[in-house]
Image: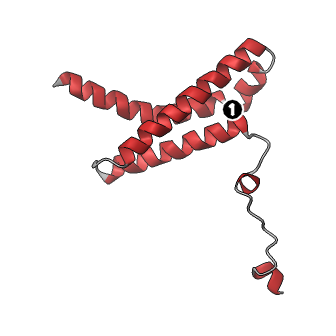
Amino acid sequence: MESLVLLATLILALALFTGPISIVLTSKIFWNYSIRSKPLWVFRRIIVATISPLGMTVALFLIFTQIPITPKLFIAAAFGVNVAALKREFLRDRSWKKIFKIKSEDPNGPTGQS
């Protein structure tokens, strides 16, 4: 029975802690430090590109299982943090509007009616 509790704890920890670890690895401090060394840069990118999708997969699995709502909210937040970390790693220069091709100058919208 203890091994089942340990497995559940590890799965929940994987979902919850991969996002903050990825955010830390994509922070400006680590980004600027690792850009000086090509092997360190590649290693950091491989780590982020591995643990973020893994955490997102486990988070999606846990969101669609029958667990109480409070852990689901934490897991949904962890999923969002993993998405933000991947965006910071690979699309740092682009805004969310450009990624989703959102045009703010809609001639039929509120700004076009005045």
> Which quadrant is home to the C terminus?
bottom right
Q: Is residue 15 above or below residue 100?
A: above
Q: Amino acid at mark 1?
A: Ser
For the point 82% across and 81% down, the residue is: 112
Lateral position of residue 60 relative to residue 114, left or right: left
- Residue 83, percent from left and from top: 59, 43
Lateral position of residue 86 relative to residue 2, left or right: right
Lateral position of residue 7 relative to residue 87, left or right: left
- Residue sitting farthest toward the bottom: 114
46 or 14, which is in the foreground? 46
Q: Is residue 57 above or below residue 76?
A: above
For the point 74% across and 57% down, the residue is: 97
- Residue sitting farthest toward the left: 1
Secondary element under disc 1, as helix, strand or loop, is loop
**Crowdedness near tag 1: few (<14), some (14–19) or many (≥20) residues, C-alpha within 10 Å:** few
> Which quadrant is home to the N terminus?
top left
112 or 29, which is in the foreground? 112
For the point 29% across and 31% down, the residue is: 8
Q: Which quadrant of the figure has residue 35? A: top right
- Residue 106, percent from left and from top: 79, 74
Mark 1 sits on what residue?
Answer: 27
Q: Is residue 14 above or below residue 33?
A: below
